[in-house]
Amino acid sequence: MDSYLRLGVNIDHVATIRNARGGDHPDPVRAAKMAEQAGADGITAHLREDRRHISDADIERLIDGINVPLNLEMAATDEMLEIALRHKPHAACIVPEKREEQTTEGGLDVVGGAHHLKTYIDKLSAEGIRVSLFIEPDVAQLDAAAGLGAPVVELHVGSYCDSRQVARSRELQRIEKAVVHAHSLGLECHAGHGLTYDTVGPVAAMPTIAELNIGHFLIGEAIFTGLENAMMRMRSVMNKARARETA
């Protein structure tokens, strides 16, 4: 088992700030390069149907401009499939998407949407794109993901991050159960959504989680401390939690 825990940095909300006034500043591709230089193991960008933050041009420039893997978050639509197949990012994370939501509100229903999702998983995989499914930490959803041949799942940990005290402990137990089950199915397990300095430790300590994807919090902290410092502190918390677990 590899004890190293990868950190993927989501740069969507650099584009959100840029798009608030239009123009080119701040540039999310510049942020991605800075994150890479600061030690990010990958860059994540979500190209939404409504293009509210990341643009098509951003994806083109990211493909050409970074040297770490690009994880393209995308809805299971023909438009996004065509874009992914044209650019061939290292990975594509299929996420649910609703036009009116502020951010992704939960995981895919892989159980109910298996027939629809299989087409996208198969076509992406055939082109060498590593597919992950963004799902709730739920045994039935994990079983369905494995049945479709997806090699990776990313667990939505937002409910854990947003809850407090007893509820948070219950959500953490739910994640722990899902992580163990994912490992038993041979799935590579990632986690993301809402992680902060205060919440990342218990998730990072789970030894079979391979990668955390963190965006909004890091970009917010970067306003106050700079992106490199925010990443260094996050990496430190992650590494200490993983070291305690594997010691």
Image: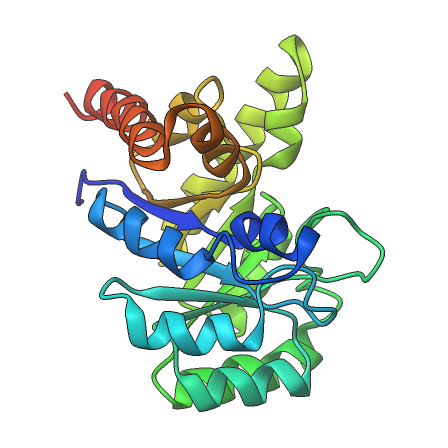
**Colour pattern of the rendering:** rainbow
Q: Is residue 11 left or right of residue 135?
A: left
Residue drawn at 41 percent across, 22 percent down: 202
Identity of the residue drawn at 43% across and 26% down: 200
Q: Nearer the viewer, residue 129 or 71?
A: 71
Q: In this image, 135 relative to 70: left or right?
A: right
Residue extending farthest to the left is: 247
Q: Nearer the viewer, residue 186 or 106?
A: 106
Can you give x and y, in whole percent of width and height, for residue 61 in the image? 40, 74
Q: Is residue 187 visible?
A: no
In the foreground, 19 or 188: 19
Q: Position of residue 15 (x, y in %)?
A: 56, 55
Q: Outermost residue toward the right?
A: 100
In terms of depth relative to the viewer, which is nearer, 221 or 179? Answer: 221
Residue 126 x/y as whole percent = 40, 90
Q: From the viewer's perspective, is residue 177 above or below residue 6? A: above
Placement of the C terminus among the 4 image quadrants: top left
Q: Quadrant of residue 137?
A: top right
Quarter occupied by residue 242: top left
In the rendered image of this protein, does residue 210 appear above or below residue 47?
above
Q: Is residue 164 in sight in this rendering?
A: yes
**Location of residue 188 (image quadrant):** bottom left
| 111 is higher (above) or lower (below) than 177 | below
227 sits left or right of 173 in the view = left
The number of numbered discs placed on residues in the rendered structure image is: 0
* Residue drawn at x 49%, y 26% as measured from the top left: 196
Q: Position of residue 206 (x, y in %)?
A: 35, 31
Query: What residue is at 53 percent from the left and 62 percent from the top?
Result: 24
Quarter that holds the N terminus? top left
